Image: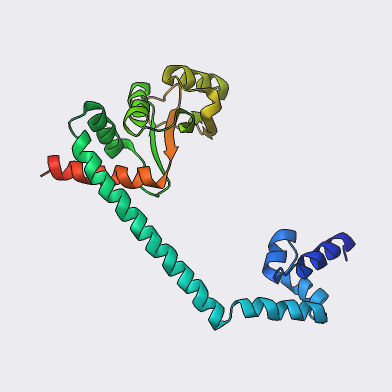
């Protein structure tokens, strides 16, 4: 028996951790933990305490909390959607607003609800996206983030420097670089600077963006 692991397991158990939690933290099989603790009175008391957390009364309280959170989310989202409607009608004749919206409709990330994101190889397009973030969405300059997708035969530092210069975005705001295998289909040209992802976090922005696209479609795709 590994004495250090055994001691760590005891410490975690006495802190109220379940077998599953200890297994995850220390990579010890549940069968081993059972051998160590099943006959310990203090461990059985902890087991009862954990089980009591899952009592019907406690579960009812948790369900009520979840329902309250869901209701708050509905109210919040409704507020964002109402604001989006008002903003759309104020901005729909603004060229930069329409440009950013149509780019996002074609190239933007649609899934998820925590950020807005556009990935592309076209630096000119991404410059428009950044202007849209800055001037239309009023995003704080320091909150604009970039991520790179770089082919394995390219130098990541050089690619990062290129995008930083062409987009006028500090290197400190380039958060992540992913390396791609250089497999290109016949007849398709590989980008020498990979792909750049320009994104901003924010549930409010994502909800509004998707609502603006819906309103744009209603106006122009009849």
Residue 188 appears in view: no
In the image as oriented, which residue stretches furthest toward the left? Answer: 222
Out of 213 and 3, give the one closest to the viewer: 213
Q: Say which quadrant the C terminus sits in.
A: top left
Q: In this view, does 205 lie above or below 99?
A: below
Residue 105 appears in view: yes
Q: In which quarter of the image is residue 126?
A: top left
Please state the horizontal and vertical placement of residue 112, each as a whole percent of the image. 40, 49
Q: In which quarter of the image is residue 175?
A: top right
Identify the residue at horizontal 76%, vertical 69% (top origin): 13
Out of 83 and 164, give the one closest to the viewer: 83
Identify the residue at horizontal 31%, vertical 44% (top origin): 208
Q: Is residue 59 above or below residue 9?
A: below
Q: Is residue 91 above or below residue 3?
A: above
Identify the residue at horizontal 42%, vertical 69% (top origin): 67
In the picture provided, is 108 more to the left or to the right than 88?
right
- Circle count: 0
Please state the horizontal and vertical placement of residue 205, each as a whole percent of the image. 36, 42
Out of 186 and 162, give the one closest to the viewer: 162
Please state the horizontal and vertical placement of residue 154, each as a whole percent of the image. 53, 23
Identify the residue at horizontal 22%, vertical 34% (top origin): 91
In the picture provided, is 219 more to the left or to the right than 41?
left
In the picture provided, is 52 more to the left or to the right than 101?
right
């Amino acid at each position: 028996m590994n004495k250090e692991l055994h001691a760590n397991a005891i410490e975690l158990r006495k802190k109220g951790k379940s077998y599953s939690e200890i297994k995850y933290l220390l990579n010890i099989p549940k069968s081993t933990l059972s051998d160590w603790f099943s006959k310990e009175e203090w461990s059985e008391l902890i087991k009862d305490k954990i089980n009591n957390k899952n009592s019907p009364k406690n579960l009812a309280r948790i369900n009520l909390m979840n329902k309250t959170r869901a209701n708050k989310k509905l109210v919040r989202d409704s507020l964002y959607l109402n604001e989006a409607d008002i903003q759309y009608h104020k901005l729909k004749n603004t060229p930069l607003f329409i440009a950013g919206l149509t780019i996002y409709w074609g190239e933007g990330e649609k899934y998820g609800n925590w950020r807005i994101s556009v990935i592309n190889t076209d630096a000119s397009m991404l410059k428009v996206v950044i202007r849209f973030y800055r001037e239309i969405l009023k995003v704080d300059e320091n909150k604009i983030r970039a991520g790179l997708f770089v082919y394995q035969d390219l130098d990541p530092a050089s690619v990062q420097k290129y995008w930083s210069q062409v987009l006028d975005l500090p290197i400190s705001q380039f958060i992540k670089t992913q390396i791609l295998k250089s497999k290109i289909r016949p007849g398709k040209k590989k980008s020498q600077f990979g792909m750049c992802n320009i994104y901003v976090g924010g549930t409010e922005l994502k909800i509004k963006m998707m609502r603006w696209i819906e309103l744009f479609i209603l106006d122009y795709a009849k």
